[in-house]
Image (tube, rainbow, N blue to C red):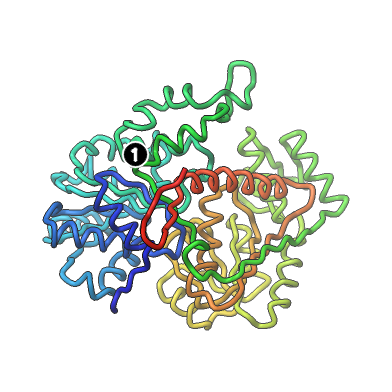
Amino acid sequence: MEFKPHNYQKFAAEFIMKNMVSALFLDCGLGKTVITLSAIYELMLNQFEISRVLVIAPLRVARDTWPAEISKWDHLKGLTYSVVIGSEAERLRALKARADIYLINRENVDWLVTKSGVCFDFDMVIIDELSSFKAASSKRFKSFLKIRPKVKRIVGLTGTPSSNGLMDLWAEFRLLDLGQRLGRYITGFRNTFFVPDKRNQQIIFSYKPKAGAKEEIYKLISDITISMKSEDYLDMPKCLINKVVVTLSEKERKMYDRLKADMVLTIGEEEIDAVNAAALSNKLLQMANGAVYDENGQAILIHDRKLDALEDLIEGANGKPVLIAYWFKHDLERIKKRFKVRELKESQDIADWNEEKIPVAVIHPASAGHGLNLQAGGSTLIWFGLTWSLELYQQTNARLWRQGQKHSVIIHHIVCSETIDENVILALGHKGKMQDELIKAVKVNLGVTHYANTL
């Protein structure tokens, strides 16, 4: 297929070629894969600046999306690739095969660096979904940091750079520029730009930015960072957000409030125990959805309020395909028990959905978060269970609300009133606002005759 790049795609590819280190915060649907591949082709086969490229991506994206894009476009003919996925023997064979681009899932970065025994001689690295390296304590971060000085060129791609706040940026840019802009140590970054927020005497639970810190951080990273929003460059479909509220009965409310207050709840002969604040949050989310796990991992039914609301929404779709996002395993089990649904897990499931062969589909945000194009199969998404993760939330929504969607997208949130569901909705809004400020700060304005970064 012939590639006819938009102006913003040309600019982004040139940005990668111009900068040895670059961060591209690009919304879903803008074509970040073909943009990056176009830059790789030019650098490798025309300018001879690089010879071996490593792409680190989520499993499904590394296995399916990148190979499909390389094969799809006429202007990329000549680029070869090897998919470093599967058993250890299969991964080793793939690493030893002759290719221009090597595609590996992020879970195997530690294996590649510390266990494979293969010399790390990649002169360019692409981190697709840079936000998956935001935890400096993770093995993938520590392992990659060891070999980062060997890498001549590096590109970080993501649409959600700071899904949990500005603190996420330190680890991401530590890998990109080795600490040149935000410092080599998280302690220094934190002390410079943040002050304690929530705390219990000497124990600090969270930090908030100092006055002016956001602007200073944005300024520090702006020379190697660009951002683009889909609605600024694409003819995006209308997106309608709907909140469907369900209410607990008096009995159900008492059980919820008792667990929230005491962190322990007895239901019949079963005891539900939340050992800390994180566990309590998890249990309360489960209860809001309609069931809760006991100490033996068995789901105890609390209510069917959300299932009733889900039934109304499915009927209200009047036969149009519906995609349901669930969070807990017991959500899926109860949805399957009540409705005829199909999980989107394998490539065939996704193909059937996009051919409108599946009336009601279910998907988990962790598996739907990146790399799936589902816009051809439907335009209605229902959040049965909510997630605290802004990244997974936005990326899941973007499976339907993206370029190529022919209809207005409707996103329903089933929210249990006066429960932790309402806190999650508020938190996602707050995180989204913070991230939007970052993206706006490094946003690209594409003029008719020139390009410019604006702060």
Please tell me in which quadrant of the rendered image residue 446 appears: bottom left
> Outermost residue toward the front?
449
> Outermost residue toward the right?
250
Three-letter amino acid code at the position of disc 1: Phe
From this view, report whether residue 154 is shown above or below residue 326.
Answer: above
Q: Residue at left 19%, top 43%?
A: 152
Q: Nearer the viewer, residue 252 or 107?
A: 107
Q: Residue at left 34%, top 48%?
A: 156
Q: Residue at left 27%, top 54%?
A: 55
Please tell me in which quadrant of the rendered image residue 324 appears: bottom right
Label 1: how many Cα within 10 Å (few below 14, some 14–19, many 20+): many
From the viewer's perspective, is 46 left or right of 200? left
Q: Nearer the viewer, residue 179 or 441?
A: 441
From this view, report whether residue 176 is shown above or below residue 397.
Answer: above
From the viewer's perspective, is 66 left or right of 303? left
Q: How many numbered marks does the figure carry?
A: 1
Q: Which residue is mark 1?
A: 141
Q: Nearer the viewer, residue 356 or 9?
A: 9
Q: Nearer the viewer, residue 267 or 386?
A: 386
